[in-house]
Image (cartoon, rainbow, N blue to C red):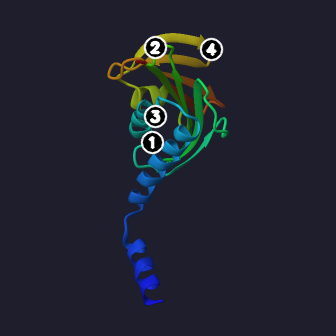
Amino acid sequence: MYKKLKLIGLLILLPISQFSQAEKLSGLDQLTQQQDIGCSSELRTLADSTIKQNPYRILGYNEENQNIHLFNALAVTSHRDRDSHVSFYGVKNADGSCDTAITESYVLETTCNDARNEAFSKWDLKGKLNERTVVLSSKRILGKEAFLTSQFTTLCLVTTRQVINN
């Protein structure tokens, strides 16, 4: 009984971020292993750069153990000021290489003009999809784009995507 209490006491003292990191890696690793995807290292790199130390839950599109060519999973990630939906995609090409993509969507409680001036000030304007949606391109991250869509004049729906051809 004393050993159990001691173990519980040690677990309580461990930083929560250690649990978040372990969850992130094990959740994505389990999905890629279950689905026999050869893109697991590329997908893990995307997850590390996007989810970081934030708590999250992840769900694969197809949970069955079979050899599929397209991997897809959706995660809900908790940031300190908002939640976001993150979709991971991985496809194994005929030559054995993997192409991956990531899409993240979230709502900011500000106008898209303010979001563009604050969070996306160093992104290039690519154009408009319609009257409410602007498309931006990252100067720092190759192939990363952002779509800012005005919602109810006071909110901004942000979707970022990045495709990596390996």
Name the quadrant containing residue 59: top right
Would you place residue 66 above or below residue 137 in this image?
below
The image quarter containing residue 42 is top left
Q: Amino acid at mark 2?
A: Asp
Q: Where residue 24 sits in the image (x, y, percent)?
A: 47, 48
Contact between marks 4 and 2 (CB within 8 A): the answer is: no
Disc number at residue 131?
Answer: 4
Mark 1–mark 4 distance (CA, rounded to whole Å): 31 Å
Residue located 62% across and 14% down the image: 131
- Label 4 vs label 2, nearer the camera: 2
Q: Quadrant of the C terminus?
A: top left
How far apart are the two marked residues, 1 and 2, measured between alpha carbons?
29 Å
Work out whether mark 2 precedes mark 3 in sequence or the reverse, and give the earlier one.
3
Rendering coords of residue 44 (x, y %)? 43, 37
Q: Amino acid at mark 3?
A: Ser
Q: Mark 1 or mark 4: name the one nearer the start of the chain.
A: 1
Q: Disc 3 designates what residue?
A: 40
Disc nearer the start of the sequence (3/4): 3
- 159 vs 42, nearest the viewer: 42
Mark nearer the viewer, 3 or 4? 3
Q: Residue at x 60, y 26 (%)?
A: 150
Gap in angstroms between the C-alphas marked 2 and 3? 16 Å
Mark 3, Cα crowd under 10 Å, few <14 / some 14-19 / many 20+, is many
Determine the CA span between mark 3 and mark 4. 39 Å
**Tag 2 residue:** 95
Kindly tell me whether residue 163 is visible in this rendering.
Answer: no
